[in-house]
């Protein structure tokens, strides 16, 4: 039943079509009108009745790969097939057909095919490219189509220009590619043997020349061993001649052509002319000197007879038995071993030693492992000690010594490595500072306090006397920085004087610095920490050495120690004051210095960090700002607010420090750092409103502070006697480390 003529239903087939072109079916060929487009589509590219679509190139299944076109996706990708074809030979009686193997290459980018036949030696037929690369049409009647990838498979025949090729196998890439596009691959087939080729191979194997050619191949040896040389040290005892001196030589054996050259080693002031070579490079005969031979007497081959003229047209017969040939023996690499004697044109030379390459060569080729050198010379005499004149007193000892070591005096060299390692690096000063006092009977000098600084970069010592009120002594530099000699040494002597080193300075030591005795009483925290960190260099700060001294106390002394701990700690808390601990160790017979006692106390101390007074630090900061007339607080508020993008009233410590430095806030780095830390919150941000309000001496003045308190914050360490940071000692832990267990000590 026909559909009614409703809106949307129309019999017009051109509705929605956008192509109306017509294919050209008729044309003239050589002036004759004929149909030329039987397979062309109708109007608009539609197929006529009975027509089918034919793809121009290979159609690959769409998958997870690239959407690029085939000429781009398969660029330089080729399928390789092994094939053969049979060719009839009607003009020869020995063979009826030939089996010719070839390679079929299918280029995926444009469906082109190339057939190549590998070249065989003495085949007598043109081989190489049989079919150049191009698209090959299918056999008739489908010759208007071309081969594509779906026409190829293993163990099937393919016809290329009326020649039938049998595909036997393919490479792994081709097999994997065909499997991925859905081709079921057949099992590989075998290639039949060519009867005539088999017959030729049997004939070549059975052929034996009556006079085999003697091949002398020296190129292989040259290519394998070029620039490889064995090196030996030789000795020639030439005591029979006039001067009767031994000769040292270097023998080079060239593996490329088995030649030898010898160089002589000339000692300084030997009196001999330095000739370039002792023996020129060449083959060295074993039995030398050899008799003189006539030209042509020694040849590589022996000739029996020569026919015809001498030259290219002449012929000759070689003597394979080498009748009457004169042979000479030359030294080979197998004849050169350590300890052997070789004949160098009548001179007996002893091989004494070889280099590492020569040892490895003999180890790998001949399996030799013993390469003990042969000693051939007496040990050199001891070098006489150079006598140095005594010190004259002018300049330094090092400078005077350098003037005696050469005609051109040079300044003494400093230890540059030590200077770079131990020089000041950032906040690490690498300076050991001690507090010392004079050892004298003068009551005024007894009370003078000195800061003795030892510089680790160059082992120099400087002494500074800090100011003391109402002392009557002018403070300042007491000793210029320089190296100080140890006492008790002669001034005018040939040996170098001994100077004070870092190991000579420790708490409790008594030093004579330029004939002035000093007693070291204390040190700063950096000095104690540095000595403990480098305990292997400073035995006075080595906790292991100190404990080993305490272990060897007597039984009576051990009982006294137990009684002392029981009296000092009646509550059995395991803790005693440092002063009691120091008194105990000083009375023991273990000979511990003051520095060792302090090191032991620091190792087993219970340290308490004192709380810092924020109001006192703000008062000190305001006092310093007031002295420097700093009043830019309003500008600092605007700078902090500008940097605070979120208007939270907080900034990071780094940003706050940068702003303070940009305004050149006249506060020391340590005091500024501590103040910023005090105004940090849990998120490590600075409350800059509270910080600026605290240091503003105009709007929020703090009470005045004593000058001594201000000086305390100005100077990190003055060298004065202060309360010790170590106040309590954990003696129970000490007893456990020294005697094994504190409980056993208490029970006993």
Image: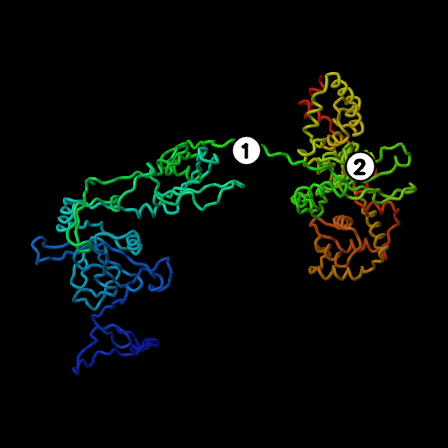
Q: Residues within 10 Å of mark 1 (few under 14, many from 20)?
A: few
Does 686 sit above or below residue 491?
below
Residue 162 circle label? none
When the figure is inspected, residue 155 is found, relative to residue 525, above or below; the finding is below
- The number of numbered discs placed on residues in the rendered structure image is 2
Kindly give the residue lying farthest to the front in the view shown: 242
> Can residue 412 be seen?
yes
Pointer 2 local density, CA inside 10 Å: few below 14, some 14–19, many at least 20: some
Return the x and y of residue 391 as percentages of the image width and height.
Answer: 74, 38
x, y percent for residue 341: 39, 33
Q: Which tag, 2 or 1, sits closer to the chain's start?
A: 1
Q: CA distance from mark 2 to mark 1?
A: 46 Å
Relative depth, front residue between 292 and 318: 292
Farthest-out residue, bottom: 31
**Colour convention of the picture:** rainbow
Kind of element beneath mark 1: loop
């Amino acid at each position: 039943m026909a559909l009614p003529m409703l809106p949307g239903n129309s019999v017009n087939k051109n509705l929605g079509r956008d192509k109306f072109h017509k294919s050209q079916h008729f044309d003239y060929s050589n002036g004759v009108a004929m149909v030329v487009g039987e397979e062309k589509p109708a109007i608009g590219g539609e197929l006529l009745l009975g027509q089918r679509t034919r793809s121009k190139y290979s159609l690959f299944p769409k998958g997870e790969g690239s959407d690029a076109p085939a000429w781009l996706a398969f660029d330089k990708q080729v399928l390789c097939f092994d094939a053969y074809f049979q060719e009839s030979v009607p003009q020869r009686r020995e063979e009826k057909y030939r089996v010719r193997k070839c390679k079929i290459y299918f280029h995926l980018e444009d469906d082109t095919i190339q057939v190549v036949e590998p070249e065989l030696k003495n085949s007598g037929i043109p081989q190489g490219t049989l079919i150049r690369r191009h698209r090959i049409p299918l056999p008739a009647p489908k010759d208007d189509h071309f081969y594509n990838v779906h026409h190829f498979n293993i163990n099937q025949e393919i016809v290329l220009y009326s020649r039938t090729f049998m595909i036997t196998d393919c490479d792994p890439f081709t097999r994997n590619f065909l499997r991925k596009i859905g081709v079921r691959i057949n099992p590989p087939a075998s290639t039949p043997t060519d009867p005539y080729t088999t017959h030729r191979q049997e004939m070549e194997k059975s052929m034996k020349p009556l006079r085999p050619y003697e091949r002398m191949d020296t190129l292989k040896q040259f290519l394998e061993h070029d620039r490889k040389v064995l090196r030996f040290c030789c000795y020639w005892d030439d005591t029979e001649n006039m001067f009767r001196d031994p000769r040292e030589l270097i023998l080079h054996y060239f593996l490329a052509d088995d030649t030898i050259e010898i160089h002589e080693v000339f000692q300084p002031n030997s009196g001999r002319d330095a000739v370039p070579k002792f023996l020129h490079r060449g083959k060295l005969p074993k039995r030398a000197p050899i008799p003189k031979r006539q030209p042509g007497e020694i040849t590589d081959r022996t000739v029996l007879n020569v026919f015809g003229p001498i030259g290219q047209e002449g012929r000759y017969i070689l003597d394979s038995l080498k009748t009457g040939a004169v042979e000479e023996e030359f030294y080979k690499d197998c004849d050169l071993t350590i300890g052997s004697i070789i004949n160098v044109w009548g001179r007996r030379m002893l091989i004494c030693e070889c280099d590492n390459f020569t040892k490895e060569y003999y180890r790998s080729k001949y399996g030799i492992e013993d390469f003990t050198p042969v000693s051939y010379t007496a040990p050199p005499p001891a070098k006489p000690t150079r006598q140095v004149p005594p010190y004259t007193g002018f300049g330094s000892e090092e400078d005077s010594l350098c003037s005696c070591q050469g005609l051109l005096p040079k300044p003494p060299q400093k230890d540059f490595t030590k200077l770079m390692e131990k020089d000041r690096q950032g906040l690490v000063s690498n300076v050991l500072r001690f507090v010392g006092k004079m050892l004298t009977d003068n009551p005024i000098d007894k009370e003078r306090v000195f800061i003795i600084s030892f510089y680790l970069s160059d082992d120099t010592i400087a002494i500074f006397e800090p100011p003391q009120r109402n002392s009557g002594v002018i403070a300042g530099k007491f000793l210029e920085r320089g190296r100080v000699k140890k006492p008790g040494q002669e001034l005018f002597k040939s040996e170098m004087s001994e100077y004070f080193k870092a190991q000579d300075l420790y708490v409790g030591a008594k030093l004579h610095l330029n004939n002035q005795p000093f007693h070291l009483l204390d040190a700063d925290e950096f000095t104690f920490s540095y000595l403990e960190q480098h305990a292997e260099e400073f035995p006075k700060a080595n906790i292991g050495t100190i404990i080993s001294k305490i272990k060897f106390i007597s039984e009576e002394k051990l009982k006294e120690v137990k009684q002392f701990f029981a009296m000092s700690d009646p509550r059995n808390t395991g803790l005693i004051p440092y002063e009691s601990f120091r008194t105990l160790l000083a009375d023991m017979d273990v000979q511990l210095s003051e520095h060792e006692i302090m090191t032991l106390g620091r190792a087993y101390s219970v340290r308490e960090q004192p709380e810092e007074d924020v109001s006192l630090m703000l008062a000190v900061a305001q006092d310093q700002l007031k002295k420097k007339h700093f009043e830019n607080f309003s500008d600092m508020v605007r700078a902090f607010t500008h940097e605070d993008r979120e208007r939270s009233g907080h900034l990071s410590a780094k940003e706050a420090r940068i702003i303070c430095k940009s305004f050149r806030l006249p506060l020391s780095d340590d005091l500024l750092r501590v103040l910023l830390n005090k105004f940090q919150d849990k998120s490590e941000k600075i409350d800059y409103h509270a910080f600026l309000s605290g240091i503003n001496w105009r709007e929020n003045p703090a009470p005045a502070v004593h000058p001594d308190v201000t000086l305390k914050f100005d100077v990190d360490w003055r060298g004065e006697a202060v309360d010790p940071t170590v106040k309590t000692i954990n003696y129970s832990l000490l007893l456990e480390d020294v005697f094994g267990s504190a409980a056993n000590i208490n029970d006993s």
